[in-house]
Image: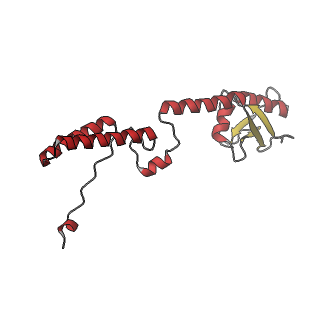
Amino acid sequence: MDPAFLSPPSPSPPPLASPEDADITNTTSANDNKSRGDSPSTSNRNRNSSNSSNSSRSRSGAASPEIPLTLSASVMLADLPRDATAALASAGEQFSSAAHGGKVVVKFKAVGSAPALQQDVCKISAGRKFEEVVRYLRRKLRCGETESVFLYVNSAFAPSLDEVVGNLHQCFKNAHDQLVVAYSITPAFG
């Protein structure tokens, strides 16, 4: 049997994280080359060819030398921004544009003995506070100042009055892009 088949394969070096690491790796390989009897000019040629391949790879944008990723992670993360600052800035722009300019759809659902509304869907500016939704509903139900109305988002929790409607919509909207607000005259969901 051939001894080459019995020997384990030699491990490949880990991917380079930065150009500085390339110089360190090539320096050690140059020392290895000297111990094997190679000339310094051969190791310099190897260093130059590896540096040119690293620089062409970083210019083409095919692989990022700063962040080594596995293939599966790079496929999933292909469209993400390079740093967290850019991600937060773009997320802030999306929320501020939706919160100040857009309107959200609110659907009211009567619970228990609460009277049903003739028109149970309304639009409200996304930048408004939840207290304006309460005020609107009290006006539509013609409630007196001493009567109580309890509002719940998705029949689960009662948001605070200073909560922004756009934030509630962003987090708790249904499949029809509506914020479902259940209301009752008596406490219903806790």
Q: Position of residue 140 (x, y in %)?
A: 84, 33
What percent of the width, then of the height, locates residue 166? 68, 33
Of the pair 103 and 156, the residue shown nearer to us: 103
Task: Name the residue at the front extreme.
Answer: 41
In this view, the residue in front, 64 or 49, is 49
Q: Is residue 79 above or below residue 148?
A: below
**Looking at the picture, does residue 23 appear above or below residue 146?**
below
| Residue drawn at the location 36% of the way across and 43% of the way down | 53
Q: Residue at x 20, y 66 (%)?
A: 4
| Visual colour scheme | secondary structure
Tell me if 69 is positioned left or right of 147 in this view. Answer: left
Whether residue 190 is visible? no
> 171 and 26: which one is in front?
26
The N terminus is located in which quarter? bottom left
Picture coordinates of residue 24, whole percent (x, y): 25, 37
106 with respect to 77 (left or right): right
Which residue sits at x=43%, y=38%? 59
Give the tally of numbered discs.
Answer: 0
The image quarter in which residue 63 lies: top left
Q: Quadrant of residue 89?
A: top right
Q: Is residue 75 something that shows in the picture?
A: yes
In the picture as drawn, the residue positioned furthest to the right comes out as 118
Rendering coords of residue 92 (x, y %): 59, 30
Q: Is residue 117 left or right of 182 when viewed as pictured?
A: right
Residue in the picture at 40% in, 42% down: 57
Residue 43 versus residue 134 in the image, above or below = below
Quadrant in which the C terminus appears: top right
